[in-house]
Amino acid sequence: MMLAGLSFRMEKQAKHPVRTTEKSLRLIAELNRLGEARLTTLSDELEMGKSAVHNHLSTLEKHGYVIKNSDTKTYRLSLKFLDIGGQIRGEKDVYKVAEPKIKEIAEESGELVHLVVEEDGKGVYLCRSKGEHAVDLDTYVGCRHHMHSTAFGKAILSHLPTERVDEIIDQHGLPQVTPQTITARDELLEELEQTRERGFAVDDEERLEGLRCIAAPIRFNSDVIGAISVSGPTARIEDDWESNEFVSQLRRAVNVIELNKYNV
């Protein structure tokens, strides 16, 4: 697959993959994509035999990960995944100390505020809070986005070792999302250097046209552990970054979060 600014993409490979497990994971991913589906539909989409699909579904249903609707003969993922995700999120120290500040910034700014961490080279949303005037974006707790096209991503990348940044680019590429998206490695590295110098990152319509975002990294013992961001329409978030009121709000919040992190 050819990507702008990159000629190849590395996929992770298991040394000794278990095919049965891989099939179950594919099935889970397909159910997540479809929402709910009949056995026949899953068999066709996954190009797996009906009996094999049924065996996987029955096993997942037995352990509470899949729910079957007896009336419609359809299957869907259960809320057990939410239970697991909620427990994992609750164990994150950065979530414990940052979540109150996320709500506070949203109330003060009136915009959409996110707490994001990096996992496997992508940004994962741990928390979101909507202010009074916030736009409704395609974000939700647990969703993942590329790092290079987002302010939170660049805020985190700017404090990762160069070797790690290269690994992330090699793994996920630099796909173009809007005409403003950075798709060249050298240009991204220059942007990260500028981000590091000024202490915050910007997304100027790079992920979604008409939307601007400002983000600040959260650091602990010199390591970057996440970022918080404010997003809003270009009409409300001006590109005079240094004098932007949202930058001051983020800096104050990060300062409190980093201090509180020492007490967790």
Image (cartoon, rainbow, N blue to C red):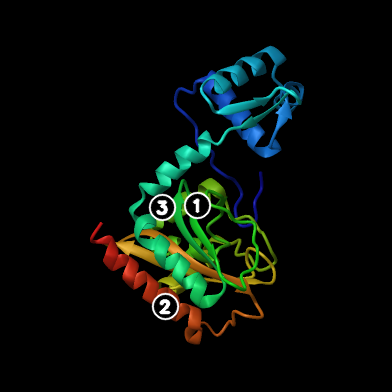
Question: From the viewer's perspective, is the residue at label 2 or at label 1 nearer?
Answer: 1
In space, the residues marked 3 and 1 are separated at their CA atoms by 17 Å
Query: Which kind of residue does numbered mark 1 sit on?
Result: Val
Q: Residue at x 56, y 18 (%)?
A: 59
Question: From the viewer's perspective, is the residue at label 3 or at label 1 nearer?
Answer: 1
Would you say residue 38 is visible in this rendering?
yes
Q: Residue at x 36, y 56 (%)?
A: 96
Q: Is residue 96 left or right of residue 13?
A: left
SS label for mark 2 = helix
Of residues 20 and 233, the one nearer the viewer is 233
Q: Is residue 5 left or right of residue 88?
A: right
Q: Is residue 59 above or below residue 234?
A: above
Disc number at residue 198?
Answer: 2
Quick one: label 1, few (<14), some, or many (20+) residues within 10 Å? many
SS label for mark 3 = helix
Q: Residue furthest top?
A: 51
First in sequence: mark 2 vs mark 1: 1
Query: Which residue, given by chain and number where applicable, does mark 1 sit on?
Result: 124
Query: Which residue, given by chain and number where applicable, does mark 3 sit on?
Result: 164
SS label for mark 1 = strand
Would you say residue 201 is visible in this rendering?
no
Q: How many marks?
A: 3
Query: Which kind of residue does numbered mark 3 sit on?
Result: Arg
Callout 2–callout 3 Cβ contact below 8 Å: no
Residue 157 screen position, x and y as percent: 44, 60
Q: Residue at x 59, y 82 (%)?
A: 238
